[in-house]
């Protein structure tokens, strides 16, 4: 068979999927195991405990550390476990790895790292009630 220009047209069978392609064995991922329903008496005890890790309990510091009392950050209570990276001021710290490891995948606010380039402004809650800010860019 030829087209109008006289160029032979290949038979349609060459453009069809080859029969051997469908006969190849396909490797699928394994099927996950069936979920077992809790039908024993322990189901009531386990329903009160979540299946996921909860955040560590928070225990915010309430007192200013002695080393901070002579700095512009004398009004900010800090956790004494934090490791200072750049001296006393500005306050740049990280938590000890053992404390982070013991808390699991979630870090409590007391052990979160801090990066400052200057003093922390002292603002009373009553001063900022009518503040507004915009995010642009």
Image (cartoon, grey):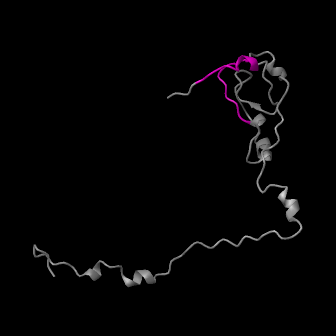
- Give coordinates of residue 91: x percent, y percent: 71, 25
Q: Is residue 131 visible?
A: yes
Magenta span covers which residues?
Answer: 112-133
Q: Quadrant of residue 50?
A: bottom right
Number of labels in the image equals 0
120 in the magenta segment: yes
Q: Which residue is depicted at the point 10% across and 73% down?
A: 5
User: Please, is residue 135 above or below residue 99 in the view?
Assistant: above
- Picture residue at 82% right of the left edge, 32% below the top: 60
Q: Residue 114 appears in which quarter of the rendering?
A: top right
Q: Residue at x 28, y 80 (%)?
A: 14
Q: Does 39 lie within the magenta span? A: no
* Magenta portion: prevailing SS class: loop
Q: Is residue 124 visible?
A: no
Decide which of 7, 68 is in the foreground and name it.
Answer: 7
Name the one closer to the observer, 85 or 110: 110
Relative to 109, residue 49 above or below: below
Residue 22, image x, y percentages: 43, 81
Residue 58 lies, with reference to residue 105, above or below; the image says above
Can you give x and y, in whole percent of width and height, for residue 10 in the image?
21, 79
Residue 52 to residue 34: above or below = above
Identity of the residue drawn at 14% across and 79% down = 2
128 sits to left or right of 99: left
Residue 93 in the image, given as x and y percentages of width and height: 72, 31
Quadrant assignment for the N terminus: bottom left
């Amino acid at each position: 068979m030829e087209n109008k220009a006289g160029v032979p047209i290949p038979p349609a069978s060459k453009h069809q999927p080859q029969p051997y392609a469908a006969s190849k064995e396909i490797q699928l991922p394994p099927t996950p195991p069936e979920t077992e329903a809790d039908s024993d008496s322990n189901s009531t005890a386990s329903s009160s405990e979540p299946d996921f890790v909860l955040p560590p309990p928070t225990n915010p510091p309430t007192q200013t550390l002695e080393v901070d009392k002579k700095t512009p950050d004398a009004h900010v209570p800090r956790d004494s476990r934090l490791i200072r990276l750049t001296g006393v001021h500005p306050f740049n710290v990280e938590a000890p790895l053992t404390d982070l490891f013991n808390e699991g995948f979630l870090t409590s606010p007391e052990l979160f790292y801090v990066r400052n380039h200057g003093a922390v402004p002292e603002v009373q809650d009553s001063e900022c009630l009518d503040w507004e800010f915009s995010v642009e860019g």
